[in-house]
Image: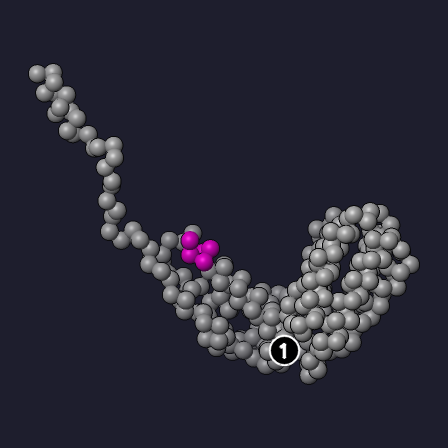
């Protein structure tokens, strides 16, 4: 009788290796490319938020590239739906990315129409170069006196990357590599607020002027060569040469 009760009890327990069937509807449908960025209450919020932020970040970088390349004309108004069609996404991530560009001063909001690309003057570019020089030159001179050669040598691949981008004439790619090199130099100061402010000013200085000629490959190559020369002077701790190169570098950015 005890054996019979044991068999009955075992029969009521699920087998350890038994697979629990998946419930119907647990597989989340794939979000179409065109619909990414739109919020619907039927979707789990956490995965959708990650997806939307990912798309918004990609669109933000695409818009920044378009600004540097001159694909977005200063003074022209662009609507979020039209740009969404251009990039193959919904209007929502485009609108969110444009709001960020408005904060950065690249565009301005035009109610009920979209976003107007900011018109920039040579004077504005010169002012940005002056402010950048006021911030970066003293920091670089201090670092030139205190950072050992080994600390600068690690930055050589970044300087070389600017030369590669310049050689191909890739303006947007060069702008990114240019900022990366300057960030790496200033990062040695250990001041995060300095990095944030300097990078914002640097990005603003890279937007093209109204009716500005296309940046020539030769200009990019010359600018990249200044990075290499500056790095060699920093490795040698030649403060006099560093000061001359940095000031010339910022004067060149006012063209």
Which residue is pictured at 53% across the width and 64% down the height?
Answer: 58
Which residue is pictured at 23% across the width and 44% down the height?
Answer: 21
Query: What scheme was used to colour the molecule?
Result: one colour
Give the x, y percent position of residue 118: 64, 76
Q: Is residue 32 left or right of residue 94?
A: left
Give the x, y percent position of residue 60: 56, 66
Q: Is residue 103 above or below residue 9?
A: below
* Magenta segment boundaries in residue numbering: 47-51
- Is residue 48 inside the magenta stretch? yes
| Residue 94 seen in the figure | yes
- Is residue 21 inside the magenta stretch? no
Q: Is residue 233 above or below residue 216?
A: above
> Looking at the rendering, which quadrant does residue 239 occupy?
bottom right
Report which residue position mark 1 lands on: 70
Q: Secondary structure at mark 1?
A: loop
| Residue 179 seen in the figure | no
Which residue is pictured at 78% across the width and 76% down the height?
Answer: 255
Which residue is pictured at 75% across the width and 76% down the height?
Answer: 218
Secondary structure character of the magenta stretch overall: helix
Q: Is residue 177 above or below residue 50?
A: below
> Looking at the rendering, which quadrant does residue 215 occupy?
bottom right
């Amino acid at each position: 009788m005890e054996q019979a009760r044991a068999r009955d009890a075992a029969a009521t327990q699920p087998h350890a290796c038994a697979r629990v069937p998946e419930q119907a509807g647990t597989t989340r449908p794939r979000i179409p490319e065109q619909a990414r960025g739109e919020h619907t209450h039927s979707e789990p919020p956490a995965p959708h938020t990650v997806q939307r932020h990912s798309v918004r970040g990609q669109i933000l970088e695409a818009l920044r590239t378009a600004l540097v390349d001159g694909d977005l004309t200063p003074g022209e108004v662009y609507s979020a739906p039209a740009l969404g069609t251009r990039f193959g996404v919904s209007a929502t991530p485009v609108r969110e990315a444009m709001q960020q560009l408005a904060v950065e001063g690249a565009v301005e909001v035009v109610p009920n129409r979209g976003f107007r690309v900011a018109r920039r003057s040579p004077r504005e570019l010169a002012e940005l170069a002056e402010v950048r020089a006021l911030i970066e030159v003293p920091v670089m001179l201090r670092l030139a006196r205190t950072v050992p050669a080994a600390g600068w040598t690690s930055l050589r691949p970044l300087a070389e990357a600017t030369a590669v981008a310049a050689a191909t004439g890739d303006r947007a790619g060069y702008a990114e590599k240019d900022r990366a090199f300057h960030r790496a130099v200033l990062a040695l100061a250990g001041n995060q607020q300095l990095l944030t402010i300097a990078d914002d000013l640097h990005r603003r200085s890279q937007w093209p002027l109204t009716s500005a000629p296309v940046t020539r490959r030769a200009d990019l190559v010359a600018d990249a060569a200044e990075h290499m020369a500056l790095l060699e002077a920093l490795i040698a701790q030649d403060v006099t040469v560093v000061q001359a190169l940095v000031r010339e570098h910022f004067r060149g950015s006012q063209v």
